[in-house]
Image (cartoon, rainbow, N blue to C red):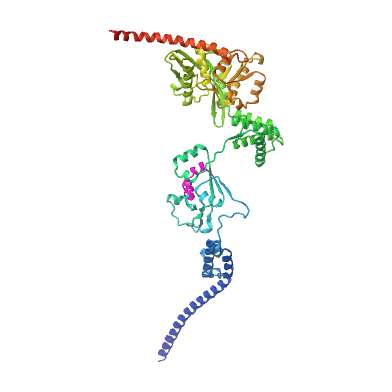
């Protein structure tokens, strides 16, 4: 009986405990609910006033107001995040991943770009316009073997930084970067910046990542590049003309005026100071300005190739440093230019050596029939130099054809072939107006084994042809450069300074080799177009040689003047008109002889045919 009583008591107690446990669970639920409600009420009171003040402040910005309302709602719904966890509590993985600052991290703003209030419109120059550098990127952190990210790891691109301003891009660099050109066009068309990775573009991204909302794009994009690239984009990309409608062109030279010289000098001083160089004296700046005119190939212009000017400033500063000077002088600039010429002159020295050794045949004195020293230019990167080349001509009875041996050997470019055709037209128009031109001629650049192009040798070639026709010896101490039109007018050519200096160097080296005293040396020089006089910017040693009469630069306007000078043996032009009449008579007599011989041979061939028709 006692056992039954104890059993019933235990069973009753167990039932009461079960009811109590069920009540405890309910009480805990009610407690949590009450605490949550209390936290919510306290949070509403604590946060509501602050957020309401912000909402009123940003009422003109609906997107900001929406964010503040959502932030307020989230803070109220997650008030427990702001309660400290007790010792022994389970770790907060979000807090660990965010360096223990989960609540602050959750509501922190990621300001991609900010501009000072009075800083003006931003001007951004992106030197490396890759896809992520333009559009921005999403970064990742490695935590416990996994890659994690959040909105705070969204990084801006150049397009974000240029908001409200200007974005300057090198078109060639943009085209070299994978996907960058298409992304740039897409942004300009949609006026939205959408952050994308290269992996997403190629469909290779397997990691779950953020997809930031597109950001409005309101900047001006400026592409800069050369004219050939602009024409290429215009022809190959139909979107280019629609997106980039304004195409201003910038010249590479400017007029050399007192005002532009003053501004040029100020810019050079500023560039030297910015690069930490020594100050430049007035004589040094003047020498650099003269070299700038040489770069522009016009004594009345200044080159705007700032990089090459800055390179010269740096080199001149190094020469001043060697002297231990505190200021850069003209001598330092000249030393820099001379050192450049030595560094890049290996091929020039080798060719000159072959000329001095008579391997390459170039005469610098005496007179020869149908032989003229032409001038060619060899360009090696940014360095170019002139070299003489022997041009010879032959004439004979023929059908009026003029053979360009360079073209026949596929060593002549189209511009050179055009020049030879102009010579044929000139000969026909001047000497065979009333009868067929019974002449065949040939022209060649002797000992040249690479392609020759350009028409700057047409004056020399024409002089060689006329010399052959008239049997007229031409001075070999002079080289000739210039283009000719069908009327015999001499036209300007390029690289006139390099050509003059190239022949001058050969003449000086040959004089040094033979040991001729200055008074016993033949007078050398170069015949150039009169239109090129304004382009002269010669080295000091050439100018000095011209001043002393050791070397001449003769400017001519017509073929007659050039031929008269080459055929004379004096230091001044003869009576060109009288001299030309005499030489032209010789040429016409030779051509009439050719014509009579041709007619005689033609008659011999036609006689049997006439006899056959008579029978």
Quadrant of the rendering where the N terminus is positioned: bottom left
Quadrant of the rendering where the C terminus is positioned: top left
Q: Is residue 216 above or below residue 445?
A: below
Residue 533's x, y, as percent?
A: 60, 25
Asked whether residue 506 appears in the rendered view, the answer is no
Residue 32's x, y, as percent?
A: 51, 75
The residue at 44%/18% (across/down) is 403
Return the residue found at the far bottom. 1
Return the residue found at the far left. 615
Q: Nearer the viewer, residue 52 or 573?
A: 573
Give the prevailing secondary structure in the magenta stretch: helix
Q: Nearer the viewer, residue 541 or 91?
A: 541
Magenta stretch encompasses residue 203: no
**Left-right relation of 2 to 557:** left
Report the span colored magenta.
169-188
Total count of labels: 0
The residue at 62%/37% (across/down) is 310
Q: Is residue 22 above or below residue 259?
A: below
**Left-right relation of 546 to 430:** right
Magenta stretch encompasses residue 176: yes
Q: Nearer the viewer, residue 360 or 440?
A: 440
Q: Nearer the viewer, residue 227 or 384?
A: 227
Q: Is residue 182 above or below residue 342?
A: below
Image quadrant in which you'd find residue 85: bottom right
Asked whether residue 520 appears in the rendered view, the answer is yes
Residue 540's x, y, as percent?
A: 65, 25
Residue 475's x, y, as percent?
A: 57, 14
């Amino acid at each position: 009986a006692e056992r039954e009583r104890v059993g019933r008591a235990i069973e009753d107690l167990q039932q009461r405990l079960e009811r109590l446990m069920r009540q405890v669970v309910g009480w805990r639920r009610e407690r949590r609910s009450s605490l949550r409600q209390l936290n919510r009420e306290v949070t509403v009171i604590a946060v509501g006033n602050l957020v309401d003040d912000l909402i009123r402040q940003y009422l003109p910005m609906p997107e900001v107001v929406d964010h503040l309302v959502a932030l307020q709602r989230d803070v109220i719904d997650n008030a427990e995040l702001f309660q400290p966890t007790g010792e022994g509590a389970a770790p907060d993985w979000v807090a660990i991943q965010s360096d223990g600052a989960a609540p602050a991290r959750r509501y922190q703003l990621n300001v991609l770009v900010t501009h000072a209030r009075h800083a003006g419109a931003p001007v951004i120059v992106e030197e490396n316009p890759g896809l992520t550098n333009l559009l921005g990127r999403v970064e990742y952190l490695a935590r416990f073997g996994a890659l994690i990210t959040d909105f705070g790891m969204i990084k801006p691109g150049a397009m974000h930084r240029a908001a409200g301003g200007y974005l300057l891009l090198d078109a060639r660099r943009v085209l070299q970067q994978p996907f960058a050109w298409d992304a740039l066009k897409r942004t300009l068309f949609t006026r939205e910046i959408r952050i994308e990775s290269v992996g997403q573009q190629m469909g290779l991204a397997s990691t779950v990542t953020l997809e930031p909302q597109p950001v409005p794009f309101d900047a001006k994009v400026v592409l800069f590049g050369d004219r050939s690239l602009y024409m290429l984009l215009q022809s190959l990309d139909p979107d280019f003309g629609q997106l980039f409608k304004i195409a201003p062109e910038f010249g590479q030279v400017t007029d050399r005026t007192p005002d532009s010289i003053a501004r040029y000098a100020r810019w050079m001083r500023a560039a030297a100071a910015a690069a930490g160089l020594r100050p430049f004296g007035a004589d040094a700046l003047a020498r650099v300005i003269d070299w700038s005119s040489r770069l522009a190939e016009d004594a009345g212009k200044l080159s705007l190739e700032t990089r090459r000017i800055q390179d010269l400033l740096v080199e001149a500063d190094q020469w001043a440093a060697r002297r231990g000077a505190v200021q850069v002088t003209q001598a330092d600039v000249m030393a820099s230019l001379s050192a450049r010429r030595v560094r890049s002159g290996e091929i020039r020295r080798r060719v000159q050596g072959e000329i001095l050794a008579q391997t390459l045949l170039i005469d610098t004195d005496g007179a020869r029939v149908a032989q003229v020293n032409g001038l060619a230019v060899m360009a090696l990167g940014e360095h170019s130099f002139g070299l003489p080349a022997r041009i010879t001509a032959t004439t004979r009875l023929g059908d009026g054809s003029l053979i360009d041996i360079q073209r026949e050997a596929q060593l002549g470019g189209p511009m050179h072939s055009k020049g030879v055709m102009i010579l044929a037209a000139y000969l026909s128009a001047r000497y065979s107006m009333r009868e067929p031109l019974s002449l065949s001629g040939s022209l060649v650049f002797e000992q040249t084994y690479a392609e020759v192009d350009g028409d700057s040798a047409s004056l020399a070639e024409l002089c060689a042809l006329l010399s052959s026709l008239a049997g007229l010896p031409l001075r070999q101490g002079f080289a000739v450069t210039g283009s000719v039109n069908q009327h015999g007018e001499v036209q300007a050519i390029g690289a006139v300074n390099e050509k003059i200096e190239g022949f001058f160097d050969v003449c000086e080296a040959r004089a040094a080799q033979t040991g001729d005293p200055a008074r016993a040396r033949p007078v050398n020089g170069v015949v150039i177009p009169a239109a090129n006089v304004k382009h002269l910017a010669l080295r000091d040693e050439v100018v000095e040689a011209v001043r002393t009469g050791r070397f001449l630069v003769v400017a001519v306007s017509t073929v007659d003047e050039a031929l008269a000078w080459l055929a004379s043996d004096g230091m001044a032009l003869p009576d060109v008109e009288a001299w030309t009449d005499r030489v032209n008579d010789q040429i016409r007599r030779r051509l009439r002889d050719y014509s009579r011989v041709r007619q005689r041979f033609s008659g011999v061939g036609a006689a049997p045919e006439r006899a056959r028709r008579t029978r």
